[in-house]
Amino acid sequence: MAIRRIRLDGDEVLRKVCKEVPEVTPRIKTLIEDMFDTMYEANGVGLAAPQVGILKRIVVIDIGNGEPLCLINPKIIESDGEQTGDEGCLSLPGLVGEVTRPNHVICEAYDMEMKKIIVEGTELLARAICHELDHLDGILYKDKTNDGLYRTDMPEEDE
Ligand code: ZN
C-alpha cells in the first residue's frame, strides 16, 4: 500500500485537462491501488488522478455503500434532476461550499480490465461522480459554489 501526496488548490496540476487512458498497464494498476489507499487514508469519498499529480482520466469513488468504483475514461451520458448541498474536496482541506448538481447521472466508463461499464448514481453518488469527473477537466467545485466557501474547522463561538 502506498499513500501518494494529495495536491492542494493552487497547484497548477489541478487545472489541467487529463489524457485518456489507452490501456491498464501494471503502472496504471499500481496508480489505481494507490489512489484507493490515498482516498481511504484521507477519509474521502472520491479521488481523481490529477489530485495525486497524474494527468490521466481515472477516478476512484467509495461512498460507503460497499461498492468501490474505479472509473477509467468516464463520461456522463445522461443527467437529470437537481440537488443542492455542501461539498468538500481533499484538495481544499477544511473547506466546504454549497454546489447544485444533477440528482441522477448515468456514466459510461471502463473498469480495471478495460471492460465498458455503465454506472448509475443518485444523490451522493451522482454528486461524487460529477465532482470527480470535473477534476479530469481541471474544474474544482469552488468554481461552482452558490455562495463561496466556508471553513469547517473554525471553533464555534456560541456560549
Ligand atoms: Zn475534489
Image: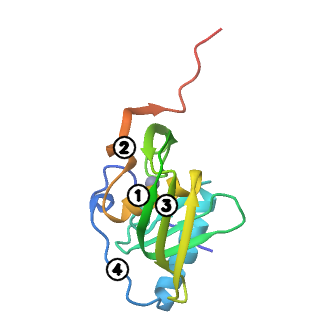
Mark nearer the N terminus (1 vs 2): 1
Left or right: residue 76 compared with residue 104: left
Q: Residue at x 53, y 26 (%)?
A: 154
Q: Picture coordinates of residue 90 (x, y %)? A: 49, 52
Residue hosting label 4: 20
Q: Marks 1 and 2: which is nearer the front?
A: 2
Give the quarter of the figure containing the N terminus: bottom right
Which amino acid does the dot numbered 4 rest on?
Answer: Glu
Residue hosting label 2: 142
Alpha carbon distance from label 4 to label 3:
21 Å
Mark nearer the N terminus (3 vs 1): 1
**SS at mark 2?**
helix
Residue hosting label 3: 105
Which of the four quarters of the rendered structure image does ligand 1 lie in?
Answer: bottom left
Q: Picture coordinates of residue 129 (x, y %)? A: 49, 61
Which amino acid does the dot numbered 3 rest on?
Answer: Val
Residue hosting label 1: 7
Residue nearest the observer in this picture, 35 or 77: 77
Q: Give the class, few, some or many, for how many residues have Cα within 10 Å of label 2's Cα (few <14, many ≥20).
A: many
Alpha carbon distance from label 1 to label 2:
15 Å
Q: Residue at x 47, y 89 (%)?
A: 24
Question: Can you tell me whether the CB of the residue at mark 4 lies under 8 Å from the nearest atom of ligand 1?
Answer: no
Alpha carbon distance from label 1 to label 4:
20 Å
